[in-house]
Image: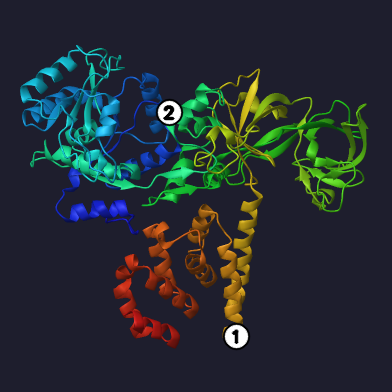
Amino acid sequence: MSTKEKSLNFIEQIIEEDLKNGLSQDKLRFRFPPEPNGYLHVGHASAICLNFGLGIDYNAPVNLRFDDTNPAKEEQEYVDAIKRDVEWLGFKWAEECYASDYFQQLYDWTVELIKKGKAYVDSQTSEAMAEQKGTPTQAGTDSPYRNRSVEENLDLFERMKNGEFEEGTHILRAKIDMASTNMLMRDPIMYRILHKHHHRTGDNWCIYPMYDWAHGESDYLEQISHSFCTLEFLPHRELYDWFLDNIYDSNKVRPKQREFARRNLSHTVVSKRKLLQLVQEGHVNGWDDPRMSTISGMRRRGYTPMSIRNFAETIGIAKRDNLIDVSLLEFCVREDLNKIAPRVMAVVDPVKLVITNYPEGKTEWMEAENNPEEEVMTYRQVPFSKELYIEREDFLEEASNKFFRLTLGKEVRLKNAYIIKGESVIKDADGKITEIHATYDDDSRSGSGSEASNRKVAGTIHWVSVAHAAKAEIRLYDRLFIDESPDTHKDKNFLDFVNPNSLKTVTGFVEPSLTTAKEGESFQFQRVGYFCVDRDSTPENLVFNKTVDLKDSWEEKGKKEENTINNSLKEINKYFKVTTDEERAAIEKTIGENIKTIANYSLLQNSLKKNIANNKASLLFSNWLLKYSESIKVSDVESETLHKLYNMSLKSESPFVRLEVLQNLKNDVAHFEQFKTQLSEMKTSEKNEVVLKLLSEMI
């Protein structure tokens, strides 16, 4: 890691500190430990990218370990899906492990704990046990079975293992402290009886270990150096360490549990239980429905592995839970597809266009570029004929001067083809337009070099030749929930926010080149959006899923906030041109008030990162984001991002930028220490009196 020139996030800092304190580099080992009780979702994708990313950065092995300790909810289907998802994201695990691999060892260790008087069989009902456990402010009371003899406990535990008792009649508990302030330390359950068939061990076991007992010990057996999990497991760390204390051999690596914040995604849910409910109640068509937040669903929708990895890297690792706007994920998807997806022509809502003066029966093949982002441009041939399909929204019988598509009496260019002029329409009995008639300029063919071909017209629209078009089922997907945080409302069920328009299926037409497209291939339907071939597609019945729009057009509020950012960036340039302090103060006040109106956390994070550039206006704006925003705090921003902002701002040519970054550093105690040396050196060379005065106060 030391070879990488970047600031470290807090997890990397933990690892670096351990290496510095004597942990050998070759002892580093990480793991991703999913439960095979459902499909992985976008939250798991972040955890996958974290653990496997650390493995790549440190050249350390990463295990894929299935926490298969509850046969009542686990299935081989989920195991297979998880492996498929991890591989699809582009990662390779060192060893494929299962908690069930360690059932015998866990049992043997448990017997030793019983012999040491540190575990006992409890025969209370679950209700009695809950009452006996106390509350966070009131100590628990001992179970009446807490002081059973070692012999009796050993006998009962073995009989539990042998299947002599019904479920719920006995459990095994660790004997720790019923008065502990940590409720998890009040004699936690280690084993429960389950007469269920296990997908790997069959019917060999009638007792199964609880997560807290199995997890840390599995880490230990695999010699995992760092066990990273989400914040809800922070209270479990004390128990994790207590169990390790009782089995740890000082000659081996002792795993260290550390926690990071869960990154929730807006307009979706990432609870396996709720995702399963969506599937079972028919709100979606399976775990891989393209509206689901599962990795399988995102793959089927057309999201790319790189876009998800870029998303995980963009949101980073934090110590506080945050709701990430789904538009950031969509931006990452759009950005990746823009580079790799071929451009094609498809009409989603077709209306027929007849070019009345084009020769009957004639077909021309037009040259069309596949992707302008390619380093070496490639082209394909697209058939053109007298009758075409165009998008219904691309024509208005009567339109204002601001309508830059086809209308009567005005010209528009057909993409890669000719300039046409609207002449008349044919309507059905209900007044709906069924045909548009137009004329074309036969000297205006794109790329011909003629004077007419270079004539500028207001707009360009796409089309598909009727004679050559392939009919396609087009599934237009939208966000599954209309609320950005559907499962956080105490007085409402998350299902109340299911978007009734999350899927609309239409029949459209695509250019003939798409008849050979394979499952999973992505395309940009020009001027419409990005689409991919669904697994239901066949050569006879093409099916395309809408992946994402060309632009984020879902929320008007989002657009307004983006405009606020852009307008503020334009306004900030004036700050450097005015000559008085009063004028500068007025500009700062206006921009500061605008920043306070922006609530979109992801937009603020993105804007902050985007504007950390070697430009004084951008740097000043980034510093003002930290100064004035009420939705994002210094503690929310990745250390790497802050380090880059502070470093570039301190070196800025503008004293205004240097002054603002000093103010931010002054209030950022966590990072101030890292810049003390740089600030001391800066004092000797600083020429601006105001900046120098503040420096002197700080150092």
Percent across and percent down for residue 237 are 24, 43
- Looking at the rendered image, the quarter that the C terminus falls into is bottom left
User: Is 373 left or right of 131, judged from the image as shown?
Assistant: right
Disc 1 on helix, strand or loop? Answer: loop
- The answer to whether residue 311 is left or right of residue 94 is right
Task: Identify the residue at horizontal 80%, vertical 36% (top origin).
Answer: 392
Q: Amino acid at mark 1?
A: Thr
Q: How many marks?
A: 2
For mark 2, what is the residue?
39
Q: Single out the mark in the foreground, 1 or 2.
A: 2
Residue at figure coordinates x 59%, y 72% from the top left: 572
With 417 as the anchor, is 129 left or right in this view?
left
Residue 651 appears anywhere in the view: no
Picture coordinates of residue 531, whole percent (x, y): 61, 34
Neighbor class of circle 1 (other Cα within 10 Å; few <14, some 14-19, many 20+) is few
Residue linked to disc 1: 579
Viewer-proximal residue among 457 and 418: 457
Counting from the top left corner in percent of width and height, residue 571 is at 62, 71
Q: Earlier in the sequence, mark 1 or mark 2?
A: 2
Under mark 2, the amino acid is Tyr
Task: Report, in whole angstroms, how far the alpha carbon at label 1 lies from the one at label 2.
Answer: 61 Å
Colouring convention used in this rendered image of the protein:
rainbow
Of 458 and 619, which appears nearest the observer? Answer: 619
- Residue 253 has which mark? none
Q: Is residue 348 above or below residue 455?
A: above
Regarding mark 2 in the picture, which secondary structure is present there?
Answer: loop
